[in-house]
Image (tube, grey):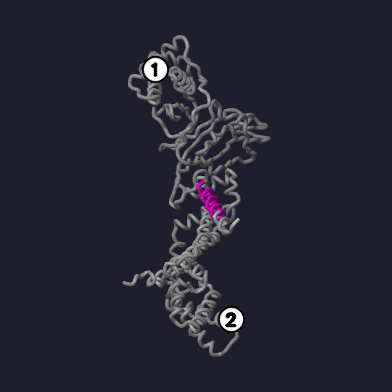
Amino acid sequence: MSARCQLCILISFLLITGIGLTLYKCAVLGFMFSPEGTETVWQVQGRIQFEAAGGPAKISLTMPVEEQSRRTVFQEKISDDYKCVFVEEEGIRKAVWTRKDAQNTQVIYFRGDFYHQGVQELDPPLSTENPYGIPTGPGKLAARDILLRARVTATSNLDIALRVIGLMGAESKSPSARILLKNVKYRREHMEQVAKILAMDGIQSRVVRGLLLKGSYTQRSITTFIRVYTGDRWALLDPNALAEIAFNEALLWPEGTRGLLDVYGGSDSHIDLSVTSIQKNAGNLAIDAGKLSGSALIDFSIFSLPIRDQNTFKLLLLIPLGALVVVILRNLVGIRTSGTFMPILIALTFMQTTLLLGLLLFLIVVSVGLVMRSYLSHLNLLLVPRIASVLVFVIIIFAAIGIASHKLGWESGLAITFFPMIILSWTIERMSILWEEEGPKEVLIQSGGSLFTASLAYLVMINPNVAHLAFNFPELLLVLLAIIIMIGSYSGFRLLELTRFEPMTRVKK
């Protein structure tokens, strides 16, 4: 296999892997490209209270449905002296608290934070089987009457469902509704009668229990909703508001769930729920949700490191961006710099000192260093002692600038300590040799190119959007590597070289 073919395969692999992982984190884990992206987080807090019988106690609470679009970012089980575990029984997830000895009034607190990645639209059921049946006897005639009245103004299955719910709620005005609701005591049974009426018209529906999230009030109670299939999607209807609500505005429990709370070894149990909403950064939410769900892409990533180490990598991940700027300017534009990656280190320094201040301090140190280096050249010192002497001079310059700026009340001058001393010493040495071999013009060209490259790299690395992408999507480094390799395989003219060969393009008249 030729080198060019290997190069194409490598570049393709890097691009596909980097872009694929990035899109996966956005589509599945909920990451966002913008650092300003926020999501609404619903904090659901619960309080379980019961009277213990004086012995072992077991409390089982059915958990909401694990929807693909809803992400759990936090779970807290505050229960002194209770052991809490999550179990799955017949496909239903439950939280179970146990205690060997429970006396008097017992209180258990819990909390969960949820957010949705967009609005979920459930797929149609695999079968058209009606789990509720249809009304029989006198109820069948009553159901037909309600359907006929609902169809008068309805234009779709959704409208019919809303009209039927409204007519079934008007008990004092509708004899047909009174017939159907004669022996109905609970809200769930009420909605099951609505589902039976809709089944007579071929409209699929499911009765579910859930917790409404939206609204201005804090205290909530679990209520009954009905899902209706409109022909191309599922719609979630709130019978109390007689309106459709988005699936991300409610927590739904599994179908067929009746009692959500079971207490063994106690009596007089009840549960109180409260809901609040806050805005949080989407990136942080995606990280927290990934950690809670055990996502391998989160567990084996920078996000699993301590915060102190994460902050270090926030800076390190910007270095490849500076390297890309250097590669573009040197290999495609043709700008000459003093050293290959010295501009990257200067750009990192500018991030600590700001651009203008960094340029000023750099020029001062290098200018004074060149003067001192020219004096050392007359002493005929060996290479290593000469560079060590330059390093000592650089440190003396640092100290002088720092002390003078402090005495003058110019505290910004203390930022000189952010400059890498070893790199500055080598820069001064290289420029001094270049001055002796090529002259001052070449020194100005390379030093000017270095500062221009460093300034441009600084502007790229300091951009908050770029920093966000580099830290939250480190797999984009593979894309960056592919671009650098592509540039490395380029052997054509550089942009600044076009002026050198421009006379060759002229045609003699």
Residue occupied by mark 1: 147
Q: State which region is magenta.
A: 9-23
Describe residue 91's horizontal placement relative to residue 355 as left or right: right
Describe residue 266's horizontal placement relative to residue 336 as left or right: right
Tell me whether circle 1 and circle 2 mark residues in contact (CB < 8 Å): no
Task: Classify 232 as above or below 24.
Answer: above
Task: Classify 7 as above or below 89.
Answer: below
Q: Earlier in the sequence, mark 1 or mark 2?
A: 1
The residue most toward the bottom is 379
What SS does tag 1 mark?
Answer: helix
Q: Nearer the viewer, mark 1 or mark 2?
A: 2
What SS does tag 2 mark?
Answer: helix
In which quadrant will I find the C terminus? Answer: bottom left
The kind of residue tagged 1 is Leu
Q: Is residue 442 magenta?
A: no
Q: Position of residue 395 (x, y in %)?
A: 54, 79
The image quadrant of residue 240 is top left
Q: Chief secondary structure of the magenta span?
A: helix
Residue occupied by mark 2: 388
Q: Is residue 88 visible?
A: yes
Q: CA distance from mark 1 to mark 2?
A: 95 Å
Q: Position of residue 498 (x, y in %)?
A: 41, 69
